[in-house]
Image: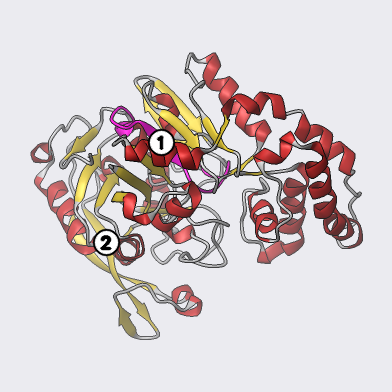
Amino acid sequence: MPALVLLGAQWGDEGKGKATDLLGGSVDYVVRYQGGNNAGHTVVVGDQKYALHLLPSGILSPGCTPVIGNGVVVDPSVLFSELNGLNERGVDTSKLLISGNAHIITPYNVTVDKVTERFLGKRKIGTTGRGIGPTYADKINRVGIRVQDLYDESILTQKVEAALDVKNQMLTKLYNRRAIAVEQVVEELLGYADKLAPYVADTVLVLNQALDEDKVVLFEGGQGTLLDIDHGTYPFVTSSNPTAGGACTGAGVGPTKISRVIGILKAYTTRVGAGPFPTELFDEDGEALRRIGGERGVTTGRDRRCGWFDAVIARYATRVNGLTDFFLTKLDVLTGWEQIPVCVAYEIDGRRVEELPYSQTDFHHAKPVYEMLPGWNEDISKAKTFADLPKNAQAYVKALEEMSGAPISAIGVGPGRDETIEINSFI
């Protein structure tokens, strides 16, 4: 019953796509369990680069069945755009399964997301404007549209009417926008029904049966631990649970079936959007990390904020996810620094704090306490074993492992599929 959860241990963009793709040849199912097309994964296979936003990274592994679980919110137009793009490049997408209980991102969800962010001005959260938050809000308010609703026009119409009763009042009276017609939304959504039908399944049953048959199932989180709606830097978070517990609710698999939880950890730290970021750099080092690391959001196209490695965050991710392993990515980006600062604690109002403060106010005022580690100049992109790394690179990895609280079982030394050092097998 080998069920693995693979998730981001920072603010997202850690390289989950590379890690999932690396494991893809060894697993039978790869499952997205939360989020929507606000999560971007870049996978490099040979000289081919794939940017995925909604689809599980495992769709690039021929023997793997990709699954979109019930906890995901699905924009059908984005889904079919991605599928068509992959089909044109010769990727077989026919094995994709989509939960009938997954919620649909409707056109009015996207509209509400965009006008709300504009209305907030300086107080905006920094969403991607893709309707993710409003769709999850509809889900919690029990006026959401599920994939299965596309196959009952009467139910679909009633649900759209219920949702627009309030939203049209808000759009017209608060935001001075035109009301959205129920019939137009229903017609657009029904237009996706036949195209979606071959993929729709009872994924909870499929996945539990697969685990009972000793198939290997990999649960892939979007975003990262610090963007979790419950455990992240609220309110600058996403609208779902990228943490390990979200895999259970977002895919319908009990926690006793999870055998391993792997955290993806960048060798430094990045963040997209607003919110606190203690180790953020505003100098030449920050620009160098951004340039060398290619730090631009796959989905948003926004430059990522860059900073040094934060061990406080890594320890927190280990704790809230029950991490058994780390996959350290982008170690090669740090080549060339004489010394590399690592944040080992925070200073808050004159106090040294070694664990993530639960208070939003304290975290906003946290200043990093750095320990300097020696750098290296050697090219590490061709390293195949841990022993191939320069001594200082080895020491850096070991220091991060000790500070973070879980073993580092794999190291990314370049963007390619084969540019990975595997220390311990994940399966």
In which quadrant of the rendered view does residue 424 lie?
top left
Identify the residue at image location x=38%, y=73%.
367
Comparing labels 1 and 2, the label whose residue is closer to the camera: 1
Task: Answer with left or right where residue 222 lies relative to residue 288.
Answer: right
Q: Amino acid at mark 1?
A: Val
Question: Front-most of 347 and 106?
Answer: 106
Question: Front-most of 151 and 420?
Answer: 151
Q: Quadrant where the C terminus lies?
A: top left
Q: Is residue 264 visible?
A: no
Q: Amino acid at mark 2?
A: Val
- 24 within the magenta span: yes
Identify the residue at image location x=29%, y=75%.
354
Residue 403 screen position, x and y as percent: 21, 63
Mark 2 lies on a secondary structure that is strand
Q: Is residue 185 visible?
A: yes
Mark 1 lies on a secondary structure that is strand
Range of the magenta residues? 22-40
Look at the picture and state if 86 lies above or below 354. above
The Cα–Cα distance between marks 1 and 2, rounded to whole angstroms, is 33 Å
- 173 within the magenta span: no
Question: Front-most of 54 and 215?
Answer: 215
Q: Which mark is residue 342?
A: 2
Question: Front-most of 128 and 37?
Answer: 37
Task: Answer with left or right where residue 214 lies relative to residue 188.
Answer: left
Single out the residue that lies furthest toward the bottom.
350
Residue 29 screen position, x and y as percent: 39, 33
Look at the picture and state if 273 lies above or below 103. below
Q: Which residue is mark 1?
A: 30
User: Which one is earlier in the sequence, the residue at label 1 or at label 2?
Assistant: 1
